[in-house]
Image (spheres, rainbow, N blue to C red):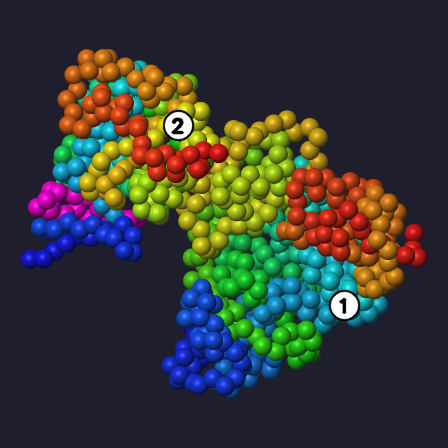
Amino acid sequence: MELWFSERYTPNAQFSIRVDKQIFSTQSEFQRIDIFDSPEFGRFLALDGYLMCTEKDEFIYHEMIVHVPMAVHKNARKILVIGGGDGGVVRELVRYDRVETIHLVEIDPEVVQACKNYMPFTAGWLNDPRVTIFYEDGLKYIRRQVEEYDLIIVDSTDPFGPGEGLFTKEFYGNCFKALKEDGVMVNQHESPFYENDAVAMQRAHKRIVQSFPISRVYQAHIPSYSSGHWLFGFASKKLHPLRDFDPEAWKALNIKTRYYTTVLHTGCFALPAYVEELLREVEE
Amino acid sequence: MDQSRAPIYEALEQFRKARVVPFDVPGHKRGRGNPELTRFLGEQCVSIDVNSMKPLDNLCHPVSVIKEAEELAAEAFGASHAFLMVGGTTSAVQSMVLSTCKKGEKLILPRNVHRSVINALVLNGAQPVYINPETDKRLGISLGMRLSEVEKAVKANPDAKAILVNNPTYYGICSDLRGIVELAHQHGMLVLADEAHGTHFYFGEGLPDAAMHVGADMAAVSMHKSGGSLSQSSFLLTGPAVNAGYVRQVINLTQTTSGSYLLMSSLDISRRNLALRGKEVFRKVVEMAEYARSEINDIGGYYAYSRELISDAVHDFDVTKLSVHTLDIGLAGIEVYDILRDEYDIQIEFGDLGNILAYISIGDRQRDLERLVSALAEIRRKYQRDKTGLMNQEYIDPQVVVTPQQAFYAEKESLPLRETLGRVSSEFVMCYPPGIPILAPGERITSKIIDYIEYAGEKGCFITGPEDPEIKHLNVLKNLG
């Protein structure tokens, strides 16, 4: 049987995964939700036809969006996750004993339910007693928070569809306001490679730079995402992602990872020349 | 009648299928002659940009499908007759004025009218009799006309031909239209309603009275604002006391003879939509506006006002209007308007000295409302300052020296703004939007007006009207001091 899931990166380039079978499909109030089984990538989740997370490589994304800020902000105890209904970010966060509170703000309850049902490898930690889920628009939730959180992780979908508002200046500004004085915000920052992704990446960077005194970008290699070359944003009020990074302290936590290492932490902030150029263009 | 019909749209669909060979205008011939335009607008769109012809009727003298579309619209709006207008609501407003009064005759109206009303007076030479709409001191916006004020004007000008009423104003404020209609009809005057911002009154529930429903004689309805049709398309409605044939003649004085079928079909389809689903559509619009209003009021500093304004001078308030007072965060409305666009990529309808207006419609999405509210919260956090030195709008009582027509065509001279004090203006000055004149032709220029023009310019209002685009000079009447 020839059954393939394809995602167009541009009108002229696409990525395909052979599908064994479709596990689940529904149209929620916000988006279409699909879960498939595939021989190569295992089980994977797609929202509105865009691949969100696969069993095989989700560890890269989730480790990189969590451990980089957690290794810099050694006192991060109260954490806000925006988006992230698949539960992967929460799974990495609950590995830290010091974390006291995790607020997960996800707009779509059906994503969470589908992941709880079919994606236990990411969603299996959502019942941790430290986790509270709010089903609300992230932009609306954050409006009412003032100096509340140590760390905000923006695990959004792409900047079109329901995740649109999470790439705006008003969102980043409200995140700044919702963070404590040494707070850090990390966001998924799109890919620099294909033109449309790169434009979205630049727009996000421009708005973060306008909202935070410290804003750096780091990268990871995620095979199932557009071009495989993915970026993350590290924005903060005070802490610097490298100067305030304490590798020994993190090693002492004894958290076993498959992608993140303390050496990689330093290395992932070293970007290709063309990416630096794209970022510089919008930094003014 | 069957409101699920859309005769112009249906005729265009038929016409497309007939594959008629065009040896008539427009010369782009279904887009083939202008491939760049076709690529940009789409083949579907350019292929129905066609000329009047027997199967498609003629806007200047409708006998078939346009006539049917007009009849359906008249029924949907509760009017005796409806005219499809393709020159914007401006042309509808002007046709109301031009068909009810002529040179030397009087029209009673509030001063906060759209420029199109006074433009019509320039054309026909009629005399404006202004009623002072009170100003809300805190908000700096014009309110409605008190019935007692209208009565005074009617008694003082028993020869006036008609009374023009904004229903509602740009900000959503309604006068007692029912009362004004009763009063006017007792004195043999007609009532003309500028409903550029009131299309939804005809279809929604719990909204202010629509002009035709309370017996007004004519109404100009901007279908392209809350009704969803294309820009520049509009309806002119008339009641039983108005001679529709004469109104058609007046419309044809200035209307194009190549009425756009894009505009006409958009009116037809939008009328059908509102007739069939208007109640539900506007229930959602009201819900969105109420939600945004309560979220904005929750931020603090801003005041998104609503029905609590209702008083003697505010007969009713249109809750679909999201008008927000900004002065208490130390920013002029126009400044918030600019910051929203420049810093947050959010375009709202307008900002004046003390308020902004975000237009909420059938096309809005919840997540965009969240963006607007969050951006306003951010603007307060980042830009809030002391409000001393900020000027509020106030009503400037116009001193009409000559009629708009006399002033417009008189011999004039250009003077630096400051030197025009005490002279009579021959031109308009207004911030656009909202397009309500600060100064109209024939009015005396006072120091208050000059201060206002200078301040609005400094704050970044887009000032239009005068010949001099910089507004450093104004044209005044030569022989009149």
Q: Chain of mark 2?
A: A
Q: Is residue B135 magenta?
A: no
Q: Which SS type dominates the magenta stretch? A: strand
In which quarter of the view is residue B150 placed? bottom right
Who's the residue at 66% across and 48% down the image?
B462
Any mark on residue B123, and which?
Answer: 1
Residue placed most toward the observer, B257 or A203: A203
Residue lying at the far left of the rendered structure: A1
The residue shown at (35%, 47%) is A195
Badge 2 and badge 1 both on one subunit: no
Q: State the residue in front, B149 or B173.
A: B173
- Residue B101: horizontal and vertical position, in percent? 77, 69
Question: Disc 1 sits on a residue from what chain?
Answer: B
Nearest the eye: B24 or B181: B24
Residue at 34% over, 17% down: A243
Q: Is residue A158 visible?
A: no
Q: Position of residue A233 (x, y in %)?
A: 34, 31
Residue located 47% across and 31% down the image: A210
Amino acid identity at mark 2: Ser
- Residue B308 rendering spot, x and y as whole percentages: 59, 41
SS of the residue at dot 1?
Answer: helix
Badge 1 amino acid: Leu
Mark 2 neighbour density, 10 Å: few (under 14) some (14–19) many (20 or more): many
Indicate the position of residue A5 as horizontal and vertical percent values.
Answer: 17, 52
Q: Residue furthest front?
A: A273
Residue at the disc numbered 2: A215
Q: CA distance from mark 2 to mark 1?
A: 61 Å
The span shown in magenta is A28-47
Reply above or below: A224 against A49: above
User: How many residues crowd around disc 1 within 10 Å: few (fewer than 14), some, or many (20 or more)?
Assistant: some
Q: Is residue B459 above or below residue A250?
A: below
